[in-house]
Image (spheres, rainbow, N blue to C red):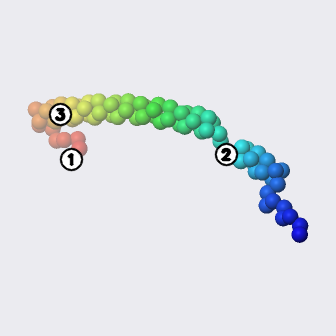
Amino acid sequence: MKKPSPVLTQTDIDWLINSMEERFPTQKQFAKYTHQVLEKLDHNSGELKTIREEQTLHSHDHSRVDRRLSRLENRSKLSPLLD
């Protein structure tokens, strides 16, 4: 009786390992990629915070100008520019 050959030969196994190494990142490569992504997120979060703070200040300036304009309109008895 002939001995059955293994399902995978060593050549097959080597080919599979090489194929996986080419297609899947190593743990070190994945850690580096993750670090880069998190750095970008931190940078973008910082920019978003700055934009929101500037928007709040800008909104406050609008409120101040609106109040002043309303007082001037009332004192001079002018009709409002916007209804």
Callout 3: few (<14), some (14-19), or many (20+) C-alpha neighbours within 10 Å? few
Numbered badge on residue 67: 3
Foreground: 19 or 82? 19
With 7 as the anchor, is 63 left or right in this view? left
Element at badge 2? loop
Q: CA distance from mark 2 to mark 1?
A: 62 Å
Numbered badge on residue 46: none
Return the x and y of residue 63 as percentages of the image width and height. 22, 34
- Which amino acid type corresponds to the residue marked 1 in the rendered image? Asp
Pointers 2 and 1 in contact (CB under 8 A)? no
Task: Name the residue tied to disc 1.
Answer: 83
- Which amino acid type corresponds to the residue marked 2 in the rendered image? Phe
Return the x and y of residue 11 as percentages of the image width and height. 83, 50
Element at badge 1? loop
Element at badge 3? helix
The image quadrant that residue 18 belongs to is top right
Q: Is residue 35 visible?
A: yes
Q: Is residue 58 visible?
A: no
Residue depicted at 72% across the width and 43% down the height: 21
Numbered badge on residue 24: 2
User: Considering the image in quadrants, where does the N terminus appear?
Assistant: bottom right
Question: Which numbered disc, 3 or 1, marks the residue that appears first in the sequence?
Answer: 3
